């Protein structure tokens, strides 16, 4: 029996490279699957306005709207800020500068399901500008999420989150 060590070493090296490559592919797939699982909760959270509320206050500076917050995931969300904006300006969280504290609703925790509430708005402008809301929250994985008033979901870094909180002039109790 004649063993060709050159072929044996080539086969072993090829098997090791193939095994390493397979391992790396599996790790990448698991990482994507984990990220998808984490993103799934955030993708099931949304908020919107339904109509002008019939429960207006005597404060003429704001118009109250009926607010719906839907946490359609199976997990709670934390440090929830609902921000009253319009459908035409501040479409990106970086566009928001100083904001009126009276146009923000804060909820320390929202369990799964639908929550109905009221929120102050600046009302409708001339033309097609209408009140709208965005939502800023922390998911169960500790990631900061922002869904703008057009429904676009963004994951924020700690720096982006802290910057937005400062620009809003609001710091929820953490």
Image (cartoon, grey):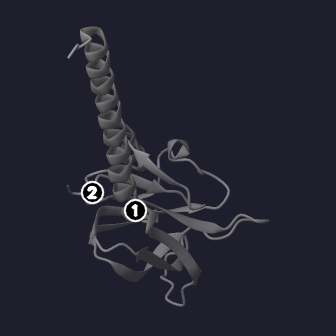
The quarter of the image holding the N terminus is top left
Q: Quadrant of residue 61?
A: bottom right
Residues 126 and 138: in front is 138
> Is 26 above or below relative to 85?
above
Crowd rating for badge 1 (residues with CA inside 10 Å; few <14, some 14–19, many 20+)? few
Q: Quadrant of residue 174?
A: bottom left
For marks 2 and 1, the one nearer the N-term is 1
SS of the residue under disc 1: helix
Residues 27 and 135: in front is 27
Q: In the rendered view, does 103 fall on the left or right side of 29?
A: right
> Is 161 above or below relative to 4?
below
Residue 167 placement (x, y as % from top left): 42, 44
| Disc 2 to disc 1, C-alpha distance | 24 Å
Residue 162: tell me if it is visible. Answer: no
Picture residue at 38% right of the left edge, 47% below the top: 32
Q: Which residue is mark 1?
A: 40
Q: How many marks?
A: 2
């Amino acid at each position: 029996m004649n063993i060709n060590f050159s072929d044996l070493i080539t086969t072993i090296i090829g098997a090791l490279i193939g095994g390493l490559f397979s391992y790396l592919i599996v790790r990448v797939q698991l990482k994507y699957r984990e990220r998808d699982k984490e993103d799934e909760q955030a993708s099931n959270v949304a908020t919107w306005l339904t109509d002008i509320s019939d429960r207006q206050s005597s404060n003429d500076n704001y118009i109250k709207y009926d607010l719906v917050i839907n946490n359609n995931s199976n997990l709670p969300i934390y440090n929830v800020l609902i921000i009253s904006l319009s459908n035409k300006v501040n479409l990106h969280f970086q566009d928001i500068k100083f904001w009126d504290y009276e146009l923000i609703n804060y909820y320390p925790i929202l369990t799964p399901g639908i929550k109905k509430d009221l929120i102050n708005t600046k009302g409708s402008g001339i033309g097609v500008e209408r009140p709208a809301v965005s939502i800023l929250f922390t998911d169960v994985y500790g990631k900061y999420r922002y869904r703008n008033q057009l429904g676009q979901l963004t994951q924020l870094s700690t720096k982006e989150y802290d910057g937005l909180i400062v620009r809003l002039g609001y710091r929820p109790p953490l």
